Image: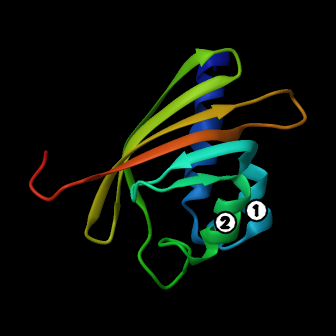
């Protein structure tokens, strides 16, 4: 496996872990995957920083084992620079479809891969 392929695989694995209800419900587990400088522009249009997202994530959709789960599709990644990967995909959560773009970075070998930025956009019904 090439270094670029390994970097993309690590970022995608992190992205999938963040969709796991157990991880979303745990401030500790989610915190291991988010960069301390993390920023998100959510599908709602709201902006979230690291602490705010960790505080609200357990109450957000997809955080309950009994509720709807994120169903990703078309997930791909590209290395933008050494230690920086962009992951893009679509997801369904119940009846809502959204498009996502995340930046994952690795500062050093100890810290591992962490989501640095995330942006989501709701896809209106009827849009392909």
Q: Which residue lies furthest to the bottom in this view?
A: 66
Q: Name the residue under label 2.
A: 23
Residue appearing at x 69%, y 69% in the figure: 55
Q: In this view, does 126 lie to the left or right of 75?
A: left
Q: Which residue lies furthest to the left in this view?
A: 126
* 124 up-or-down from 80: above or below: below
* 90 up-or-down from 29: above or below: above
Going from N to C along the chain, the mark reached first, 2 or 1, is: 2
Q: Position of residue 5 (x, y in %)?
A: 59, 22
Residue appearing at x 43%, y 36% in the figure: 88
Instruction: Determine if residue 10 is in view.
Output: yes
Residue appearing at x 60%, y 56% in the figure: 18
Q: Distance between the residues labelled 2 and 1?
A: 5 Å
* 80 up-or-down from 24: above or below: above
Instruction: Determine if residue 2 is in view.
Output: no
The secondary element bearing badge 2 is classed as: helix
Circles 2 and 1: CB distance less than 8 Å? yes
């Amino acid at each position: 496996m090439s270094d670029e392929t390994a970097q993309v695989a690590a970022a995608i694995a992190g992205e999938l872990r963040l969709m796991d209800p157990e991880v979303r419900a745990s401030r500790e587990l989610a915190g291991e995957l988010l960069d301390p400088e993390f920023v998100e522009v959510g599908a709602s249009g709201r902006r979230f920083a690291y602490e705010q997202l960790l505080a609200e994530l357990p109450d957000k959709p997809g955080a309950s084992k009994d509720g709807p789960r994120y169903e990703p599709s078309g997930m791909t990644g590209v290395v933008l620079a050494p230690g920086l990967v962009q992951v893009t995909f679509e997801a369904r959560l119940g009846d809502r479809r959204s498009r996502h773009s995340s930046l994952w970075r690795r500062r050093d070998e100890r810290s591992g891969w962490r989501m640095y930025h995330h942006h989501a956009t709701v896809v209106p019904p009827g849009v392909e």
